[in-house]
Amino acid sequence: MEWLERYRDLIPDFDGFRAVQSQALPSSCRINTLKIERCALLDRFAENGIDYQSFNWYPLGLKLDMESPGKLVENLSGFIHIQEELSMVPPLVLDPQPGELVLDLCASPGSKTCQISQMMKNLGRVIANEPSLARIAPLRSNCERLGVMNVAITRYDGRRFPSRPVQFDRVLVDAPCSSEGRERRGPGVLCKSSSKRSMDLHRLQADLLRNAIRLTKPGGIVVYSTCTYAPEENELVIESVLDMARLERISIPGLLACPGITEWGGINLNHELEKTARYYPHLNDTGGFFVAKLIKNQEHI
């Protein structure tokens, strides 16, 4: 937990932020409208005495007041998908449309892939890329359980995903990260954090993001996200690609966020970085997340 002290001047109400780390993360799920309508799912919950609370920012998100929600028949049947609340944000920022060609560059276990397909109503094509063979099984399983029909799975190193013969309308880069925002799921994540680890990840993340922008049509959208607080893995990654794309401000009514930082370690960063969004666990009773929305420059082909 002492590692978090480096963020004391970064995070509002830092003591509140520290205190919430030891509190269990509420269970949450996303209603899967590929298999059931929201009203029908809520009727099932009412009939079976399942307590829930709707998100005030996303009508298909629910907090569940129960243990082991993964055992629910509704989850096993694909009517819902157990998913951390803030994990639902990047696909909403990406805003994929039916009929488009979309790439999820770091896809497994597939929560965001399936949410993207749901938003596209199974129309168009989603390429779910996952380089690890061991992580293909949960990705495929979630797609099958949730009734996703427009996904093709690939196994490229995301840094070298081929750029021809097509370019994508939208690309999601939910990058591998130090996962500091997952501490509430179970203690121990922060013990692995270090400046060296964040800088090693920075190089991987920047390469992934640069290739994602290359793969996108001029004027297309790239969303970058992590579940960590480290500026090295967040704003500093985004700053490294601002020659290729411009930032668009993120605002989700009902979900509290802080703007991205524009200074770190005594160094001034690009002022445009304040258009990115930082989500902290004590502000929304969630985990932690960082999200940036980029529009590819027209001159970059």
Image (cartoon, grey):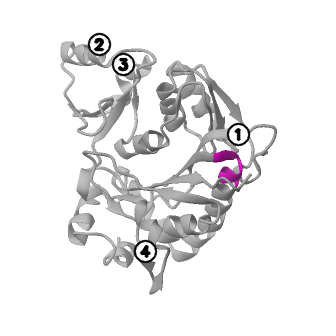
Which residue is labeled 1 in the image?
Answer: 133
Type of amino acid under label 4? Thr
For marks 3 and 2, give the CA distance.
11 Å
Which residue is labeled 2 in the image?
Answer: 40
Which residue is labeled 3 in the image?
Answer: 74
SS class of the residue under badge 3? helix
SS class of the residue under badge 1? helix
Q: Is residue 144 left or right of residue 266?
A: right
Type of amino acid under label 2? Ala
Count of all numbered marks drawn on residues in the image: 4
How busy is the neighbourhood of tag 2: few (under 14 within 10 Å), some, or many (20 plus)? few
Depth check, mark 1 against mark 4: the one in front is 4
For marks 1 and 4, give the CA distance.
38 Å
For marks 1 and 3, give the CA distance.
28 Å
**Front one among 139 and 275:** 275
For marks 2 and 1, give the CA distance.
37 Å
Q: Is residue 41 above or below residue 227?
A: above
Q: Do the residues labelled 2 and 1 touch (CB within 8 Å)?
A: no
Range shown magenta? 211-218
Q: In this view, does 254 lie above or below 63?
A: below
| Residue 262, label in figure | 4
